[in-house]
Image: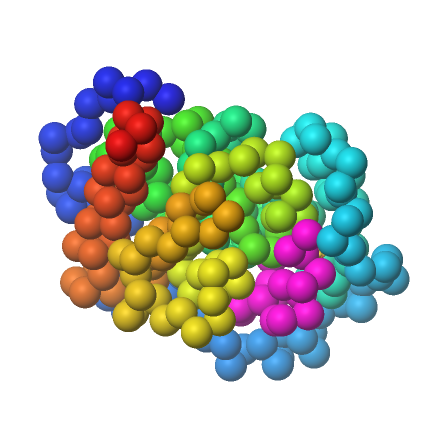
Amino acid sequence: MSDSIKIEQRSLFDSLDGLRVPKGQASLFPIVEEQAADKAASPAGPPLLEPSRENEWAGIDDLDELKRRILPCRACVLRSGAKGVVFGEGNPRAGIMFIGEGPGQTEDETGRPFVGRAGQLLDRALRFIGFSREDVFIANIVKCRPPNNRLPLPPEVEACLPHLKAQMRIIKPRVVVLLGALSSQTLINPAIRVTKDRGKWFTREGVEYLVTYHPAAVLRDEANKMKDFIGDMRSLREKWDKIQSGR
Ligand code: SF4
């Protein structure tokens, strides 16, 4: 990651027109009330394997090997409704990780994290502060798409968390950006409320964590959230520069 990266002068706000959700169009995250109907419609899927355990990946220090081992995972019910496991992607030696909630439809179809409209916003926000997707590592709390993009349920988070923790152990990020409530509550404190706590930094075991909005939430409410989201990205850049300069 270059220290001399120049921050784009063009306003990010001006560059986001293509990402706006047109009036009257459904949000990126369909309503939770559809969960029950989706559950009833979901295929039974193959039998599940034993749930993941915390020490399951303890001896693996290579991200590619971890990916190879996780891709066949069927440790929770999410896998039965998803096309596949979305492991995450980016620089395996990244100093910065971004952690969202779970794959959406586009992510499920492509096997890549944050490649839909929310991902496009994240890409532009990264460029705005002088980073690219190749500079960071992007992952989710759960690695299979929840039905109808509902929030992952506690047993699903519990089953999948060892995968993320293994990724973090191998990558060893200095900074983790928590995109939305689920990642913030899972990795920092269940009492966190993004509307109240976004923009705050937390330190855990030598790692700096920043709470901010999920990009999909920003797209749903640009008028109230975009400015804060961009401010949080600027805060990330400042924190990273301080870390790099040893301040
Ligand atoms: S969501 Fe996580 S724990 Fe559940 S099947 Fe997918 S990879 Fe395994």
Residue 216 visible in the snapshot: no
Residue appearing at x 28%, y 39% in the figure: 239
Residue 181 versus residue 5 in the image, above or below: below
Residue 28 appears left or right of 37: left
What is the quadrant of the N terminus in the image? top left
Q: How many marks?
A: 0
- The answer to which quarter of the image holds residue 124 is top left
Which residue sits at x=43%, y=74%?
A: 191
Q: Residue 226 occupies which quadrant of the picture?
A: bottom left
Magenta stretch encompasses residue 146: yes
Residue located at (35% from left, 38% from top): 123
- Counting from the top left corner in percent of width and height, residue 47 is at 87, 62
The front one of 3 and 42 is: 3
Q: Position of residue 145 (x, y in %)?
A: 60, 57
Task: Give the side of residue 171 with respect to residue 44, left or right.
Answer: left
Which range of residues does the magenta coloring cover?
145-162
